[in-house]
Amino acid sequence: MKTAATTILGRPGLAEPPTDAALTAAGGKLAAFAALTKPRIAVMVLVTVATGFVLGARGASHPATLVFTLLGTGLVAGGASAWNQLWERHRDSRMKRTAGRPLPAGRVTPLEAGVFGGVIAGLGLAILVLATNLAAAGVALATLVLYVFVYTPLKWRTTLNTAVGAVPGALPPVIGWAAATGQVSIEAWALFLVVFLWQFPHFLAIAWIYRVDYRRGGHKMLPVVDPRGFITGRQAAGYALALVPAGLLPAVIGLAGPYYFTGALAMGLFYLAYAVRFWADVDDTSARRLLRASFIYLPAILVLLLLNPLPA
């Protein structure tokens, strides 16, 4: 009589090894969960966290704390992204650029996404509480709440969602600073201000490029209600202009030195030039150039901060 166990190579009682299809399915599920964390955004988040931490440490060696800070923040950011996609799954299904995400594509269920996001976010917060300090964990929690429960639902209610979303987007360097110092001081807010203002031209350029998709998804991004782009271009240029003096603030308050000041001024004017050009033309070409300039500006500023810090 045959038993329930599968016989392999003539030996009864051994389970059949996973088939190629099963392995492929398992790999696809893992890839889907990874995609829920928005890895590219998470990398940028962790770069700004690390910058804030290193500047806050001011030369002191805290490698283990830095590792736990990055791990905890990365998990919180990944959980927030998963919940963000859970909220937006129906709208994502109507947009070309997001229809392939795990939830609208059916690669994970809403329950799986919700549980996954909650578990990794909770684990990340626990790591920050136990391995860093309450200040860092508190800022991370505020980032999570603002991003998931304030910014995300505002995306289909008001064009002010960009301004609200820029707040949690600028808090990661504050998490790093708080983890290194145990407090949120003026230096941390100077870093916050730079990243906060940088986001506006960056996201307005993205919103202009994908304005049709955003309209299809029901998101009230500024270019959706500003089809000629005059307000969009003006705001991009205005925030880029405000970023020029804001970018110099770390040198003014003694966080960075004169080489940073010179480099930040040059980068601020560089970014402003592309924002003004976008305002003048308001087309996809100028928007893509502004977007590329934004990807140059922020890494350059972070490198300048790390190369020319001032001692505490």
Image (cartoon, helix red, strand yellow):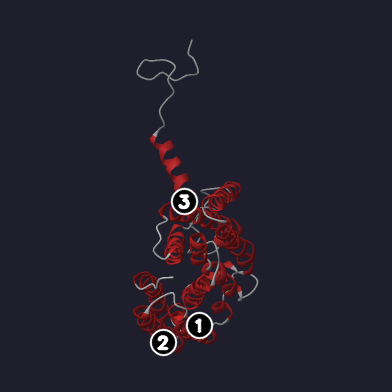
Q: Quadrant of residue 291?
A: bottom left
First in residue order: circle 3 vs circle 1: 3
Residue 117, x across and y down, in percent: 56, 51
**Distance of label 3 from label 1 (alpha carbons):** 33 Å
**Distance of label 2 from label 3 (alpha carbons):** 37 Å
Q: Residues within 10 Å of mark 2 (few under 14, many from 20)?
A: some
Mark nearer the viewer, 1 or 2: 1
Residue 82, x across and y down, in percent: 55, 55
Q: Quadrant of residue 280?
A: bottom left
Q: Nearer the viewer, residue 48 or 9?
A: 48
Q: Quadrant of residue 269?
A: bottom left
Q: Answer whether labels 3 and 1 touch (C-beta < 8 Å).
A: no
**Distance of label 1 from label 2 (alpha carbons):** 14 Å
Residue 17, x across and y down, in percent: 40, 28
Amino acid type, mark 2: Arg
Q: From the viewer's perspective, is 151 left or right of 49?
A: right
Residue receiving disc 2: 277
Up-down relation of residue 68 to residue 251 (above or below): above
Amino acid type, mark 3: Ala
Residue receiving disc 1: 239
Q: Answer whether labels 1 and 2 touch (C-beta < 8 Å).
A: no
Up-down relation of residue 87 to residue 205 (above or below): above
Amino acid type, mark 1: Tyr
Q: Nearer the viewer, residue 120 or 172?
A: 172
Residue receiving disc 3: 34
Q: Residue at x 45, y 40 (%)?
A: 26
Up-down relation of residue 125 to residue 186 (above or below): above
